[in-house]
Amino acid sequence: MPPLPTNSSQPSFSESSEKILKERYLLKGGNLETVETIAERFWHVAYDVASADFDFGATKKQVLNKALDFYKMMVQQEFLPNSPTIMNAGKQNGLQYSACFVLPVEDDLGGIFDSIKYAALIHQTGGGTGFAFSRLRPNGSRVKTTGGVASGPVSFLRVFNAATESIKQGGTRRGANMGILRIDHPDVLEFIRSKSDLDENNAPVYEEISQFLPEDSIRAHFKRLLLDRQISNFNISCAVTDKFMDAYAKGEDYDLIDPHNGEAVGKLNAKAVFDEIIDRAWDCADPGLIFIDRINNSPANPMKGVEEIESTNPCVTGKTWVHTSEGPKQVHDLIGKPFLARVNGTDHLSSLEGFFKTGNKNLLKLQTIEGYSLQLTADHLVRKVNVDTKRMEWIKAGELKSGDYIEINNHRINTAWSGKYTNQEGYLIGLLVGDGTLKSDKAVLSVWGGHNLPNLIPIAGVQSVMQVALDSSYTLPHRSDFLGWMALPSRNEHRLALGHIKNLALELGMLPGKKTITEGVEKASSDFYKGFLRGLFDADGSVQGYEGGRTSVRLAQSNLSFLEAVQRMLLRLGIFSHIYKNRRKAGKKLLPDGKGGYKDYTIKAQHELSITKDNILVFDELIGFSNSKKAKKLSQKIIAHNKRNFYKQEFIARVESINFEAKKEVYDVKIPGINYYDSNGIISHNCGEQPLAPWDACNLGSINLGKFVKDGQIDWEGLRKVTHQAVEFLDDVVQTNPYTLPQIYDEVHSNRRIGLGVMGWADMLFKMKVVYDSEEALELGEKVMKFINEEGHNKSLELAKKRGPFPNWPRSIYSDTADGSSFKSRPKSSAFKTNQPLRNSTVTTIAPTGTISIIGDCSSGIEPVFALAYIHRAKGDGGKTGNEMRYLTIANKTFTEIAKNEGFHSEDLASKVMDHGSVSGIEEVPTDWQKVFITAPEISPQWHVKMQSAFQKYTDNGVSKTINLPNSATRDDVAAAYLAAWETGCNGITVYRDGSKTTQVLNVSKTLQPKTNGLVQEEVTELSQDSIVSRPLILRGRTYKIQTPVGEGFITINRDEKDEPFEVFINIGKGGMHTMADAEAIGRLVSLSLRISRSGKNTPRQIAEKIIAQLRGIGGGSHVGFGKNRVMSLADAIAKALSEDLANSKKEESAEVVPLNLTEDQQPAPETTTGRDDVAASNLSLPLNKTADLCPECGEVTLVREDGCEKCYSCGFSKC
């Protein structure tokens, strides 16, 4: 490998980035000394990966130039590959470059243990593994070959977990695993409970020991400790099918399928199972959900057929009208064709198969009082609106009641679409339908009203209509002898006949003697719509209202279906209307007979469409009247109303009836991202981490979005360039990767799957001054990911032309030769061109970026920043022992840059942010920037899901994200997040409720905060044992402040009336959930010992001295302080506090917090405070507004969940 050219740019990384690189990534010598620089590491990666070009005939110079491009891209932090690539490429150590693998688990003992062996090899070389246990037969099944009984997938999940426990990934960390089981597996309940119910080994231990534990909170903590060690090396998820979600929506049972024979062997209630998942996820953050049918029926599964794709919910009929970006279409026009669904004026891409048949089903007809109607199945969801609270909820059509309100589409922000026919053609057809005659040989337009003179001069309003019609006629083909309007004085009528109008009417689907609104009329362009409706209202419409009263524009017709079509057309232009039925009832009426007398005639019922409120303004702007008399009247009404304005239209309609209809063929569609569409104007729901096939692997890398903002705008050209380079880089990784197993090599090279993702999203938003939890951010996220997805596919197309497509391409969804009919009609975007070979079967994914985001000095993935400032621990530069630690206050790089540019930066700003937990409420930070610099704990779960959905829309594979919930979140909150992920088109979801690992202990500890006013008032439930002394209502004591390795401790020691130690409370400022739980457990056990002592031969003081002897000197992974003030651990700190208290027992108690013999210059870090009297901030933790956890590597309380993974802000440790 040639050396790095001397004129190459050098990396300029932050101290924390360099620390991680030096400790984890740089090549080490025989004595573990670093033998390469950071620049050399990235050069070795770049050249090793670029050397893939030798396989395609490149010269050394070409490879060198390409390596320099790759090197520059990485050292400028514009793009970074996943950790195994940075760690292993160019070292010639035989370790692979991929991050994650999927291994099959076959239903036989040999296959099962082969998978364990293969997992061990992958973990040793730095990869993570995913296992689908769904093929294993259920617990209790008979095994014919041995006559024995199968133990089921959960038992083998435990075996896999135990094997992983002893395997270190590349010598640095234990292997990470994902375990998946289908929701229809007979053992699914055991799987769901596997991380929250004690297994057969731990249950007896708990039963034996828990009887000696005095209180529920301690027993709960002990149980959680056992559970956390039970399946500690797996995250688990249920593979949820569409059938299950269908059954859940209906409240029905669903079948459990034996994977060994495919037979249904039982049933479970879907809602009960879903509730079980919610309970366990609320309690311990597992299981997550993976929507397996959605994944298999998307670009994430380019090789259709890997998994069976099951049918989805039945929905609407083929005649249903659906509004699209290309205008109104009927469902039967969209079968097998992707389209852009227009919903509330915005366009959303359907899935690739468009509408698809779901069977023959019984139907309901939903009829509203206003006139809107829809045929749909009983389980189809529509959006119900509470008119008082404006709250909306999805509800099955069969559960609607008369009087309920439902949402109607409001397209006012986008009332234009392309299509056939012009405005002039529309106007003439509108006049024809309103007051014309269509015959087999001609079409005749008629107007009435004029001065009865020989030449019949038309009245003013009629004259203006005639002029517009004549002008429109001249824009159409016509004969040279065309005379225009002809007068018929005897009938007080003018007529205009034009052959092209007849031809146009027939082309639109009308027939002689049957002029109406046809499918052709409804499918025409928006320009045609406006002309047609103006002509129709000129002929038959009216303006009504009285002085000071309500104004309306009305259209009367005897044909109700005709008015319903007009209503749909108006709605697509943003005009809401109301149809009043039977304004005039059918019957007999005495009318002139034309012979000077009168006669009874049968008359049809008359119905009337009415436009009111601010819809009149939209009508006037987009349609209006050509009839000058009507136009003047409408204008006068609008002017008069301006004095008090028109009422604003709410786009809701009231249910009149739900009636059964005959059985018909029904169809459904998927609109990823929003999961609903416009059906006959009604808002109607559709049905709707890296997924891999067995032996496949993902080669990942992420673009740092924050690097592509210049002067508050996105540098699209720079982003395009790096996207193309990154795709080529990842394809080269596929080529150069030394795969561990031949099966993996074959599968990966057959599909050449890559996963280009993003990080630094929060930084991009900061630089563009966009608030994370805003519609603007969602739209920007979609736009950015769409751009990267399309440009990534464009580059893959280009590489396929140079290097050839991925070998499985002829059998993939991209090829017209494949059996992939559901995918053949792809969007017109260059990212999805059919029958044009791609180099890679998938191109984009958004994977966890825990460590590489720290290396890139940017925010993780698409997560909001977790903290704007935090403490980072680093080794000192020398000293007597060389082991001294330095504690650095690190502020978010982008935050600091903007603060300086905007003029609100100060030397102590980071400390203030640490104190507050965020910038909210800090006076020197402008209010508008306070909104922008929002942190993860300040964002509601709904916005987390929305952001995941926004990026999922234009991502081939999955989007890794953690939906963080506060500790106070309820089970309903967890359920809402899971359902939102389903409804918004996500491929899966991971929810983490803060503190869920120690829920009960934390809830109790919040009621046991130490007091600093000298009086501790706390009611404690009396224990049943006679030997335990009851606690008095009021006790006096002291609170000692002491630095510990896990944060600043406040240890309260209370005494009884005899001045003997009675109880101990321990609180660690921002200590994280495990630390707080352990602290409380120690405090309770010490207190229990002191209270029991009063019935024995030892005094409480003697017992306290024995406790001190047991706890003193216990050491951990680090210490604080020096000499006699050295504190080795939390236990050691408790011993020091007890010892100090015994020494001061005869002194008068005071109300202040007692600092325990530590001067300021002996403190390990600058002291910060929370602004509260009872608890001080830890010097080694994140801001107060979020509980972090202990890092298993550095021991700091800075381990957080982001990107669906865990990472440490102090040392860079990551589980992914």
Image (cartoon, rainbow, N blue to C red):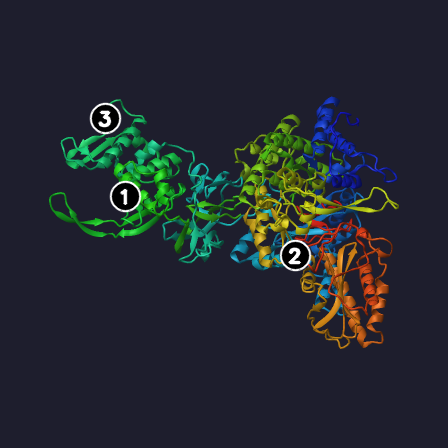
> Which amino acid is tagged 2?
Ile
Q: Earlier in the sequence, mark 1 or mark 3?
A: 3
Pinpoint residue 347: horizontal percent, then vertical percent. 49, 40
Q: Nearer the viewer, residue 986 or 662?
A: 986
* Location of residue 1040 by image quarter: bottom right
* Location of residue 1137 by image quarter: bottom right
Where does the C terminus fall, quadrant-wise?
A: top right
Query: Alpha carbon of mark 1 to alpha carbon of mark 3: how far?
Result: 30 Å
Residue that label 3 marks: 483
Query: Alpha carbon of mark 2 to alpha carbon of mark 3: how far?
Result: 81 Å
Pinpoint residue 567: horizontal percent, then vertical percent. 36, 45
Q: Nearer the viewer, residue 63 or 52?
A: 63
Say whether residue 784 is visible: yes
Instruction: Pick out the residue farthest to the left.
Output: 596
Q: Secondary structure at mark 2?
A: helix
Neighbour tally class for label 1: few under 14, some 14-19, many 20 plus, Cα within 10 Å: some
Query: Alpha carbon of mark 2 to alpha carbon of mark 1: how far?
Result: 65 Å
Pinpoint residue 245: horizontal percent, then vertical percent. 55, 52
Residue that label 1 marks: 542
Q: Which mark is on residue 192?
A: 2
Where does the N terminus fall, quadrant-wise?
A: top right
Is the residue 1171 above or below the residue 878 in the image? below
Q: Secondary structure at mark 3?
A: loop
Neighbour tally class for label 3: few under 14, some 14-19, many 20 plus, Cα within 10 Å: few
Q: Earlier in the sequence, mark 2 or mark 3?
A: 2
Q: Earlier in the sequence, mark 2 or mark 1?
A: 2
> Which amino acid is tagged 1?
Ser
Comparing marks 2 and 3, which lies closer to the viewer?
3
Q: Is residue 103 left or right of residue 405?
A: right
Residue at 40% in and 58% down: 402
Comparing marks 1 and 3, which lies closer to the viewer?
1
